[in-house]
């Protein structure tokens, strides 16, 4: 059963899964430090990995590859280790074993998925991602979080089941399950594509993200934002580079969420919509499929994990300290949380792609590739989304949380471990933004791209400053919509309200139909019973108490009938 | 609440000063097109100050459209909670 086992280091997931077991046995005081030690041990293991496929196992006739290392998987490998370290640091104050073990298994599953060389083990890690991460939502321990987690789990497991079906059909079609580049030309690859799409939050399949992420714990959302969707981006980059439909799906993803982000009140939900917007740039880059576009897509995934993680951390810190996360309840927090404010501004500048911050060095590659390949409409959409992301994530998040009108909330600055995590993430954002060459050297292709030419820098600065000018103008004139406590309808309305309402309607309609029917039957029954009672009841002619005379008469009548019957049958014979 | 230290943004005039600097930077960036010749791929990029104009209009359109969206999509905060 077992084929070749060549070791060039352990498969990264193994360290995390073993670590999660250790967590369960360790004393409570040691656990936070173990959660931090696991990804650090993983990082050391990463340095020993060599390119190629290792841990090949023949399971029946199917080749399972637990460790396939190349530039693409190594890039995501480094990234997920960094994200796991940042997350563990941010959650170091936490004593909740459920979250500690869930986040460790979750990070391990993400690493298992990006290093798996075949569709079967990819499927297993795909499902483990879902099963482990949902506990980070449930750990909030509110009824809202419970039901949001359920909806999340249904989507994620559905994605897994579709992936499984696709992988088995692919095995049937081609005779192998190696996870390599696929063409979107069969039912099998289409199913695999849809499975990736659900986890990637394609439009109409996206609500699990904006529904569940804001309901998770302050620390849980930091982990959630790092792994699931980026595993999906990795899977698309590995399986479907250059698939043209991704260009349009990606462009759509960059645009529609920003409208929601403008009117959303829950600031972590704003970041959720903004996540879909950023993933849109990556999906678009994968779809364009040129070397520059693919480099842009995966490097943007790398940067997004760090700056979106940073923004989620700052909002997590706000929620942790104030217990509030709605824009309408916050404001003026820069007075009591100045360091968190500064880190939030770094994250905001990075996601908005300010020159010298990390978003700029990766997003500009996708934009340039869209221009070079002649996708004019898509380019305009991406440009619109770039202005929009600055508006809702770059300005709105820091403005309504830390500035705006003073809400009067006075709290302590975030705990020291949170500040260290945020400082580390902010430093990475600035380092990558100012010195992108290290990141560029880790990318799948060498394109010689340089982000800092005067055209790119000037164009981007103009775009951003005039977006800010628009915000200032709208705010000063009072046109800007106020933050309101509200729920905004999204696609999930169809199954949270429309479908239940429809089922209710069916029930009531059938009820309207059934009741008269039942009444009719009852009435008919009553008539029969009445008839029987009249003739056979206690006072009736036939069934009632009889006098001797009538009894004899009836007996004689019956006797006569029998006689006639007998006579007739004799004659007939 | 103790009387806390006066914050920089709370002092009168500072916000105005900040905004004035911001407007100056915007104007300088817009004028940047005079000095720096951007190499262009799409013809629209030739328009003077294209990126600035586009950014401003995009954001105004975004906000106005989102405001209209509210009329259709906005519900009470506990919309999904009452069963």
Image (spheres, grey):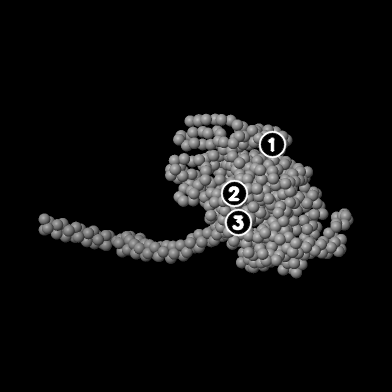
Determine if marks 3 and 2 fall on one subunit. yes
Q: Is residue A252 above or below residue A113?
A: below
Residue A504, horizontal then vertical, whole percent: 51, 60
Q: Which residue bears the numbered disc 3?
A: A372
Residue A333, horizontal then vertical, whole percent: 79, 55
Viewer-nearest residue: A81 or A559: A81
Q: Are marks 2 and 1 in contact (CB under 8 Å)?
A: no
Callout 1 crowding tier (Cα within 10 Å): few <14, some 14–19, many ≥20: some
Q: Which residue bears the numbered disc 1?
A: A40
Q: Earlier in the sequence, mark 2 or mark 1?
A: 1
Q: Quote the CA–CA distance across marks 3 and 2.
A: 12 Å
Callout 2 crowding tier (Cα within 10 Å): few <14, some 14–19, many ≥20: many
Q: Earlier in the sequence, mark 1 or mark 3?
A: 1
Q: Is residue A134 above or below residue A456?
A: above
Secondary structure, mark 1, is helix
Report whether residue A119 is seen. yes
Question: Residue A130 — which label?
Answer: none
Q: Which residue bears the numbered disc 2?
A: A291
Residue placed at 39% from the left, 63% from the top? A521
Q: Quote the CA–CA distance across marks 2 and 1.
A: 32 Å
Q: Chain of mark 2?
A: A
Quarter of the image with the C terminus of chain A in it:
bottom left
Residue placed at 70% from the left, 57% from the top? A455
């Amino acid at each position: 059963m077992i084929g070749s086992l060549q070791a060039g280091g352990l498969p990264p997931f193994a360290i995390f899964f073993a670590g999660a077991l250790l967590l369960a046995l360790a004393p409570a005081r040691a656990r936070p430090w173990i959660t931090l030690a696991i990804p650090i041990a993983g990082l050391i293991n990463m340095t020993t990995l060599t390119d190629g496929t290792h841990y090949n196992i023949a399971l029946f006739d199917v080749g399972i590859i637990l460790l396939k290392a190349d530039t693409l998987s190594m890039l995501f490998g480094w990234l997920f280790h960094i994200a796991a370290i940042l997350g563990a640091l941010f959650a170091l104050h936490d004593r909740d074993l459920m979250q500690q073990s869930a986040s460790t298994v979750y990070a391990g599953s993400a690493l298992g998925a990006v290093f798996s060389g075949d569709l079967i083990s990819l499927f297993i890690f795909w499902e483990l991602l879902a099963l482990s991460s949902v506990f980070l939502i449930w750990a909030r321990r509110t009824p809202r979080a419970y039901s949001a987690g359920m909806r999340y789990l249904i989507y994620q497991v559905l994605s897994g089941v579709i992936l499984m079906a696709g992988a088995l059909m692919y095995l049937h079609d081609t005779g192998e399950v190696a996870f390599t580049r696929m063409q979107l030309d069969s039912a099998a690859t289409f199913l695999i594509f849809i499975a990736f799409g659900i986890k990637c939050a394609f439009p109409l399949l996206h609500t699990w993200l904006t529904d569940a992420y804001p309901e998770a714990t302050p620390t849980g959302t930091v982990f959630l934002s790092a792994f699931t969707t980026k595993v999906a981006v990795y899977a698309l980059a590995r399986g479907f580079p250059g698939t043209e439909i991704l260009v349009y799906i990606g462009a759509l993803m960059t645009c529609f969420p920003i409208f929601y982000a403008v009117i959303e009140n829950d600031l972590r939900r704003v970041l959720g919509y903004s996540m879909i917007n950023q993933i849109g740039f990556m999906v678009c880059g994968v779809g364009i499929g040129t070397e520059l576009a693919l480099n842009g897509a995966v490097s943007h995934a790398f940067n997004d994990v760090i700056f979106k993680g940073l923004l989620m951390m700052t909002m997590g810190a706000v929620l942790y300290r104030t217990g509030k996360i709605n824009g309408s309840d916050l404001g003026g927090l820069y007075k009591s949380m100045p360091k968190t404010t500064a880190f939030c501004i770094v994250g905001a500048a990075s996601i908005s792609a300010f020159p010298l911050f990390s978003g700029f060095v990766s997003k500009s590659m996708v934009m340039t590739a869209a221009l070079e390949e002649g996708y004019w409409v898509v380019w305009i959409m991406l440009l619109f989304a770039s202005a929009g992301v600055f508006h809702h994530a770059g300005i709105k998040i820091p403005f309504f949380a830390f500035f705006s009108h003073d809400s009067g909330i006075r709290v302590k600055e975030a705990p020291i471990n949170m500040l260290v995590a945020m400082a580390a993430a902010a430093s990475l954002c600035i380092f990558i933004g100012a010195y992108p060459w290290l990141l560029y050297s880790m990318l799948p292709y060498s394109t010689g791209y340089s982000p800092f030419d005067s055209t790119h820098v000037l164009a981007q600065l103009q775009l951003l400053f005039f977006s800010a000018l628009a915000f200032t103008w709208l705010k000063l004139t009072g046109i800007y919509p106020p933050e309101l406590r509200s729920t905004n309808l999204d696609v999930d309305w169809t199954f949270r309200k429309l479908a239940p309402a429809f089922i209710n309607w069916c029930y009531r309609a059938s009820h309207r139909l059934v009741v008269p029917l039942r009444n009719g039957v009852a009435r008919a029954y009553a008539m029969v019973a009445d008839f029987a009672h009249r003739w056979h009841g206690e006072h009736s002619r036939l069934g009632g108490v009889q006098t001797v005379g009538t009894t004899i008469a009836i007996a004689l009548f019956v006797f006569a009938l029998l006689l006639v019957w007998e006579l007739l049958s004799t004659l007939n014979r | 609440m103790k009387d806390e230290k006066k914050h920089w943004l709370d002092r009168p005039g500072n916000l105005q000063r900040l905004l004035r600097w911001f407007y100056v930077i915007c104007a300088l960036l817009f004028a940047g097109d005079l000095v720096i010749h951007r190499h262009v791929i799409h013809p629209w990029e030739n328009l003077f100050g294209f990126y600035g104009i586009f950014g401003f209009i995009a954001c105004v359109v975004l906000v106005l459209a989102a405001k209209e969206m509210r009329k259709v999509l906005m519900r009470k905060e506990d919309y999904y909670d009452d069963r």
